[in-house]
Image: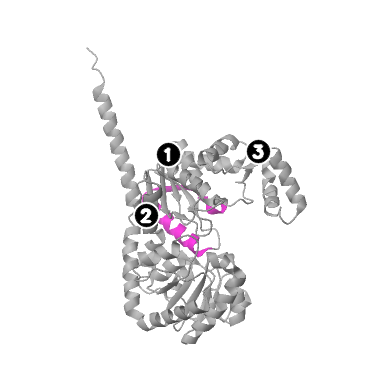
């Protein structure tokens, strides 16, 4: 059977999107032929042809309108042109109601090749697999990424396809609270999916509270399926220059030494949203952590972690760039003595090798749910930009983690191995769903035919 994979996020400089998407793709192709992908680069309102429709701007130049959209706050002439387009009917095809989004797709697909392509890809597939990942946070205003995912599931329904919504998190926004309209839309769409899998216990509890119609299954994040890659000590090369990606910027060279124990510090979504505060806090954190006597390396787990470059300049520590090979990035984290960050998937990569993690707060409940999955006795997270008092606690916890060494790493590896076994059940679950529906249909057809009147000879 052919599967359309929606939400392949390997095309951006984000360790989580890259690793989890590749791992999920590999799981899907164990049972299905992945006939096409809808990359996550299409989700934001940008220049890829999946944005405004009903425009005066010809479809081949719609990227120019999107460029004006992104710069309308800085250039008045851009804002004027966009206002004219909107006054004459131009609009984002993604709407708060997923059914309206699909109506736009079907209505405008003949004019906009990008819409026509995703329609054709969905029509060709037998099943639509939607990668919910970390996008289902019900913010105000709603995340376009979340609305896009719901629209693709709705498109699958309209075309009569099996729809699997997998690898997902469901969460309110810690900043703006719950968007009840988006929750209602998600509730309607997810209740129609053939299978919904959620990656953490908090999401299961959230679904039970807000979406009682759906019957989700717990399947840990797809990235846990990579446990075998790091099970037998896949270590980075001693000379850290070997991991620096093209174009090998000079500022990154001769700063990384993996021949001896080291500590990694990564960024976070909330920290990246306040870069000035993050630089001040992280600078103090790195300076204090270096007092433990081990080298400290900053890991840019996402392009938005660019503030770490300034932290590196202030502290003189090495940086692992965001564009590092994802498997090598995982090896670096999996072999660290401690990893401190507000990033969900990089913390999973670290845990695959048994690296103890110290969690910093981020958007949604991500960094509170992960320690629970890994069996940490304390599931609380420090602030995204830790205070001096919190830094004292972080340093003490890091010192304890280093001292605990192998017994602690063994417990973390054991928990990660369990989650790996559970994550690898995903393709089996999807296949069983299809087989069960097929048997149910055959049974219904048999009953219907048996009830037909027997024609006399």
Labels 1, 2: front one: 2
Q: Who comes first in sequence, dot 2 or dot 3? A: 3
Q: Is mark 2 on a helix, strand or loop?
A: helix
Q: Residues within 10 Å of mark 1 (few under 14, many from 20)?
A: many
- Of labels 2 and 3, the one closer to you: 2
Between disc 1 and disc 3, the foreground one is 3
Report the residue marked by disc 3.
54
Mark 2 sits on what residue?
205
Above or below, 112 against 236 in this view is above
The Cα atoms of the two marked residues, 2 and 3, are separated by 41 Å
Q: Give the residue displayed 69% in from the left and 47% down from the top.
A: 65
Helix, strand or loop for disc 3: loop
Residue that appears at 40% across and 58% down:
222
Q: Which residue is drawn at 53% across and 51% down?
A: 145
Mark 1–mark 2 distance (CA, rounded to whole Å): 28 Å
- The stretch in magenta equals 14-41
Q: Which quarter of the figure has residue 56?
A: top right
Seen in the picture, residue 304 relative to 103 is either above or below; the reply is below
Residue 29 visible at all: no
Where is residue 33? Give x, y as percent. 41, 48
Instruction: Please indicate, yes or no, whether residue 15 appears anywhere in the rendered image.
Output: yes
* Location of residue 217 in the rendering, given as x and y in whole percent from the top left corner: 34, 51
Q: In the image, which disc is placed on residue 161? A: 1
Q: Report the front residue among 296 and 205.
A: 205
Comes first in the chain, label 1 or label 2 = 1
Residue 21 part of the magenta segment: yes
Q: Counting residues from the N terminus, which is met first, the one under dot 1 or under dot 3?
A: 3
Callout 1: SS: loop
**In the displayed structure, would residue 416 be above or below residue 10?**
below
């Amino acid at each position: 059977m052919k599967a359309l994979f929606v939400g392949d996020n390997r095309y951006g400089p984000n360790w989580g999107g890259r690793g989890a998407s590749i791992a999920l793709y590999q799981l899907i192709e164990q049972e299905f032929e992945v006939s096409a992908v809808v990359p996550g680069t299409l989700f934001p309102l940008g220049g890829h042809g999946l944005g405004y429709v009903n425009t005066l701007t010809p479809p081949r130049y719609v990227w120019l309108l999107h460029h004006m959209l992104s710069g309308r706050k800085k250039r008045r002439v851009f804002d004027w042109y966009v206002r004219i387009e909107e006054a004459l009917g131009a609009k984002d095809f993604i709407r708060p109601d997923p059914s309206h989004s699909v109506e736009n797709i079907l209505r405008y697909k003949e004019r906009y090749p990008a819409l026509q392509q995703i329609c054709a890809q969905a029509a060709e597939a037998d099943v639509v697999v939607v990668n919910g990942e970390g996008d289902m946070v019900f913010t105000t205003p709603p995340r376009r990424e979340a609305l896009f995912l719901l629209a693709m599931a709705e498109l699958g329904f309209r075309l009569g396809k099996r729809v699997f919504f997998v690898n997902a998190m469901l969460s309110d926004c810690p900043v703006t609270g719950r968007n009840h309209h988006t929750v209602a839309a998600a509730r309607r769409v997810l209740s129609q999916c053939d299978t919904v899998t959620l990656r953490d216990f908090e999401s299961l509890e959230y679904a039970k509270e807000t979406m009682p119609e759906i019957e989700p299954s717990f399947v840990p994040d797809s990235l846990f399926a990579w446990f075998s890659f790091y099970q037998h000590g896949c270590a980075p090369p001693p000379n850290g220059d070997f991991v620096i990606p093209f174009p090998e910027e000079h500022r990154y060279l001769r700063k990384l030494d993996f021949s001896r124990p080291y500590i990694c510090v990564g960024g976070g979504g909330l920290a990246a949203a306040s870069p000035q505060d993050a630089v001040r806090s992280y600078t103090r954190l790195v300076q204090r952590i270096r007092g433990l006597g081990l080298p400290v390396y900053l890991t840019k787990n996402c392009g938005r972690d660019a503030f770490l470059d300034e932290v590196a300049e202030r502290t003189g520590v090495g940086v692992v760039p965001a564009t590092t090979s994802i498997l090598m990035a995982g090896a670096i984290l999996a072999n660290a003595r401690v990893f401190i960050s507000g990033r969900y998937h990089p913390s999973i990569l670290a845990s695959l090798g048994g690296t103890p993690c110290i969690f910093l707060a981020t958007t949604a409940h991500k960094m509170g749910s992960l320690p629970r999955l890994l069996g940490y006795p304390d599931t609380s997270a420090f602030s995204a930009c830790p205070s001096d008092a919190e830094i004292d606690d972080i340093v003490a916890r890091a010192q304890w983690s280093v001292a605990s060494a192998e017994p602690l790493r063994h417990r973390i590896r054991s928990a990660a191995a369990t989650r790996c076994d559970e994550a690898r059940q995903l393709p089996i679950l999807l296949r069983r769903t299809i087989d069960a529906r097929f048997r149910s249909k055959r049974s219904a057809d048999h009953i219907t035919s048996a009830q037909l009147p027997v024609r006399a000879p």
